[in-house]
Structure formats: structure tokens, C-alpha cells
Amino acid sequence: MSVTAIYPGTFDPITNGHSDLIQRACRLFDRVIVAVAANPKKTPLFTLEERVALAQGVLGGMEKVEVCGFDSLLAEFARQRGAAVILRGLRAVSDFEFEFQLAGMNRHLAPDVETLFLTPAEKYTFISSSLVKEVASLGGDIEDFVDPAVKAALNNRMR
């Protein structure tokens, strides 16, 4: 039996913390779909197409990984793609309440799809896309937090 997990997020931009979670998910699942959300409630720095391209560039060497954009209800998208698992990352206890609510709603909308929480490696627990963008916007070094291609894209966008 082949098990597909879907890892949704805005990925604005993809960080080393995201990549770490995806690498570990590849050890657990036969296929991992990195689903880059359009998310109209947020104002991303990069367009959906740019975020998908950055993620594809960063994750291109991972055989089990597929990157795609989506602009629909996650539960429906997961069902359409044949995912049995929605993968979510938890960096800190503060993430849990929101993620727990999302998991409950997704269970209601798609009872056949389970939500699984993974924590990042300790060295990535403080990294978030928002924080990386803030550091980059103030001229700080983000080399330890993102892939070199993402760093270049952020530096170009911040100019």
C-alpha cells in the first residue's frame, strides 16, 4: 500500500526548517506533496508561481517529492491528490492551538485523511518564513536559514 502525505503551507519563502521536515517525511511516506497555498488572506512577498519555483529548486533532488500550487480547500485538494495524511510542522507549543483547530476542521471535512504533526530539528525551531523575511529586509545574514537560491531571491526582492 502506497501512502501519500501532503505538506501544505504558504512557503513564503521555503526555509531550511521546511526542508528538514520534508526530508524526514520522505522516510515515512511513499510520496510527499508539498502544496504551496495561494492563501488570499495573506500578502506574500513572492507570487504563487515564484514560491512554487523556489520550492521546486530547493527540493528538486528529492525523488519522492512533488511540489505544486493550490488555491482550494485543503481537505478537498488532499482528497483529489489521493493523500491519506496532512503533514503539519510544530515549532513551539504556541503553534499547537491553531494547528489543533485546523486538524479538527480537516477531520470534519475529510474524515478519511489524518493529520500528523512533526517537529523540526532543534536547530530550526526558531525559524519561520516571516522572521527570515524580516531579517533579510533589515540586511541581516539569512544564510543559515534558507537555501542559497532562496537567499538570492530574497536579497533581490528586498533591493
Image (tube, rainbow, N blue to C red):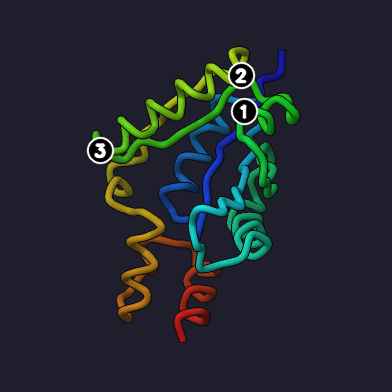
Q: Residues within 10 Å of mark 1 (few under 14, many from 20)?
A: some
- Say if 78 sits above or below 23 in the image: above
If you read the primary sequence from the N terminus, does the residue marked by circle 1 or circle 2 appear first? 1
Residue 158 percent location from the top left of the image: 45, 81
- Residue for point 49% across, 56% down: 42
- Say if 36 sits above or below 6 in the image: below
Real-space Cα distance between discs 1 and 2?
6 Å
Q: Amino acid at mark 3?
A: Ser
Residue tagged by mark 2? 110
In the foreground, 6 or 41: 41
Q: Secondary structure at mark 2?
A: loop
The quadrant of the picture occupied by the N terminus is: top right
In the foreground, 15 or 51: 51
Q: Is residue 113 left or right of residue 154?
A: right
Q: Secondary structure at mark 1?
A: helix
Label ID, residue 75: 1
- Say if 43 sits above or below 157 in the image: above
Residue that sits furthest to the front in the current view: 41
Real-space Cα distance between discs 3 and 1?
23 Å
If you read the primary sequence from the N terminus, does the residue marked by circle 2 or circle 3 appear first? 3
- Residue for point 52% across, 82% down: 156
Residue tagged by mark 3? 94
For the residues labelled 1 and 2, say whether their Cβ atoms are less than 8 Å apart. Answer: yes
- Residue for point 45% across, 29% down: 102
Residue 71 percent location from the top left of the image: 66, 46
Real-space Cα distance between discs 2 and 3?
25 Å
Residue 115 percent location from the top left of the image: 50, 23
Residue 54 percent location from the top left of the image: 61, 62
Q: Amino acid at mark 1?
A: Ala
In the foreground, 106 or 149: 106
